[in-house]
Amino acid sequence: MSTESIAWPTPEVTTRRPVVEQLHEWVTTVDHKRLGILYILYALVFLLVGGIEATILRMQLIRPLNHFVSPEVFNRMFTMHGTTMIFFVVMPVMFGFANYLIPLMIGARDMAFPRLNAFSFWMTAFAGLLLYYSFIGGDGLYGAGNAPDVGWFAYAPLTSKTFSRGHSTDFWTLSLLVSGFGSIGTSINIIATVFCMRCKGMTLAKMPLLAWLNTIMATLVILAVSPLTAAQVMLLVDRYLGGHFFDTQAGGSAVMWMHFFWVFGHPEVYVLVIPAFAFASEIIPVFSRKAIFGYPVMVAATLCIAFIGMSVWAHHMFTVGMSAAGNTFFVLSTMAIAVPTGIKIFNWLATMWGGQITFKTPMLFCTAFLFQFLIAGLTGIMLGNAPFDWQLGNSYFVIAHFHYVIVGGILFTLFGAFYYWFPKMSGRMYSETFGKLHFWLFIIGFHLTFDFMHIPGILGMPRRIYTYEPGRGWDIWNLIVTIGVFFQAAGVLVFIGNLLWSYFRGQIAGSDPWDAWTLEWTAASPPPAYNFATIPEVRSRRPLWDLKHPEDPDWQYE
Amino acid sequence: MSAPSITVPEAELQWKLPARGPVAMYCLIAAEAAIFTIFVVAYIFYIGKSATGPQPRDVLHVPIFLTICLLSSSLTIHFAVRLLKSGRVFSFALWWTLTILLGAIFLAGTFREWRHLILDEGLTIQTNLFGTTYYSLVGLHAFHVTVGLLALLTVIIFTFLGDMGRQHAERAEVLSMYWHFVDVVWVVVFTVVYIVGR
């Protein structure tokens, strides 16, 4: 793809400053791009940590009656793996990309509240450290070396003082509380930025889809993370002040916690996946050389997903035993959410249809996402049926389903986004060869692990068991699943290596390596602190297309 | 849109976006409302489920005077902001101080009520489900009143230092939105705790 059409100024070469001074700049920065990168790097570190925890889990389950780790460590590992991946990997990385890209895409010089932005990042960062400090301080006076072991949704009464001695659960609660404040702060910032900082001419209907979808994500964070904050406060009241919210012996209700958690927990899935949709909606058009198909429908479908997504939470609780009316409502609302999701998949397919597709690494990941997310949605529909869920709830089938969503859907587009915007963030191209190697390693590993994980679930293997007896028909499947993990780990190592190598040695990318259409590609790579020397003015959804093709601009047709 | 390119839409000529302060405050209010919703739901769900006494109808008295104080503080802060907008800083300071006083009376009343409940009635957060939910919900609201009061106090300190002027009216208005929200929440808390729950 060409960059000849427009000449861009090259970034000035500055002399190297002392490391301490540079570090100080990063710590005190309020620049949305630097904070975005901090978010992303922070999430990458925790991705490795959470990945190591997953590997430990799979090593333990590789064969029956294994004793790779102790049962206690196993419980801690699955709790920490889940909590880390949701709260300290996917959420921060999505906030990172939103932070970095939204001001650039809407032609602004920074977020609406730069200092709130920095505050939110450091809240999230310290929350992660707080969670991991539990490995040292979790047992408090009882001894060293503990971590939360109550599962990532921490059902009552496991979290009561009686069953959870020491402070490990408190570390879990407090760290989610603190990271929740960070998430809400960033979300407020995103919404204010999108509504108040757009450049001239960029009406809401001309915003890039990424900005739209992240706004919807931020709205969901505000409406969904707050209930979690409230529930964590209640848990703290129970644990520290002797309250009875979730204390069944005093008339409290353990099911109440489940409701409060999943009122957060299900919208959270959409909080994670909507930014992934946003990446796909930016990457697929550029590599298909076509404008996105059905832009208004994409926005409307996402709004529908967010709206319906607020009312499906109790499909996580079919096995608890709800009333028939409750079951019916949550089955139907769960079925309903498949409709807007399906619309989006068809729109992406229609964007690719008849396009001149080039399968660069970002596009490869997004194509795989389409296929895998479809399957994840289909198993979701299966589990959304209450009777089916009574059979397979809390089995490895559920684990396979939601990892298909989070890894097969979200992580794949996320890798795509890394490769797509890496030239913009670093100024250098990544290695296409190693990018493709990463893709193939990861897709093989992914399918080995998560395709075959469905089967032991159907055969009755429950989630969170420490080990199992031979001869139940689970052995071979668990072996295959664990083998897949090594392919995935190899893929991630290639990915990290590629990023590091390309950062120092990659080809200079220029400002617009993909011949793309949104405003971030008009800024230099990496963009200067002020983003745009003059604030741009736009007249269509693809301002760069208009600039490159003055004879046939988009705004004549929109 | 296939109209000829010469006609520039009016929206492009007048490019005006909403101010970021109120937008952010609305978002914060939405988040806070979600938090309060969870506590209110918990309160309603646990009405009458306490295993032991005391029950709400035995110990709670409807705080009508405090409610009047808090709700009228919404009115006084509204007047204050309007006066600041027209640049009358002294009158603004008067109404703003009155708002703080009304809020402080409310907090003091809550303090007295809790003192009575704890010392005379023996109801603490540990006593029963009523105690747990009551102190949490009313306490969460009182916490928000306290935060609001601290913010209001900051403004009045700046006013006495002579640093407040018409140019700060928008910011004062954003703060007043928060204060209105705290008052609206009290209407809900009052209804749930002192009318429905009793």
Image (cartoon, coloured by chain):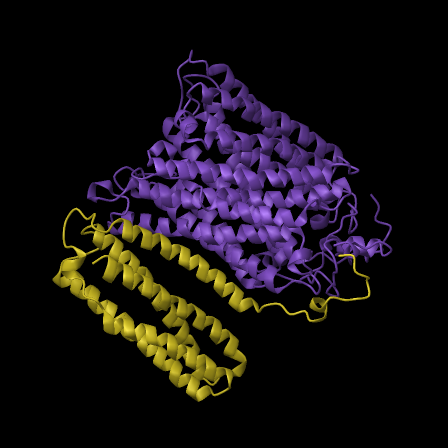
Chain colours: A purple, B yellow
x, y percent for residue A98: 60, 52
Nearest the viewer among A476 and A170 is: A476
Q: Quadrant of the C terminus of chain A?
A: bottom right
Q: Residue at x 39, y 31 (%)?
A: A75
Q: Quadrant of the N terminus of chain A?
A: top right
A22 vs A84, left or right, is right
Residue that protrudes farthest toward the left in the picture:
B120
Dividing the picture into quarters, in which one does residue A348 lie? top right
Q: Is residue A41 visible?
A: no
Q: Is residue A208 above or below residue A75?
A: below
x, y percent for residue A95: 57, 50
Dividing the picture into quarters, in which one does residue B135 lie? bottom left
Q: Residue at x 39, y 80 (%)?
A: B96
Nearest the viewer among A303 and A283 is: A303
Q: Residue at x 21, y 54 (%)?
A: B131
x, y percent for residue A433: 75, 32
A532 vs B102, left or right, is right
Nearest the viewer among A175 and A472 is: A472
x, y percent for residue B4: 82, 61
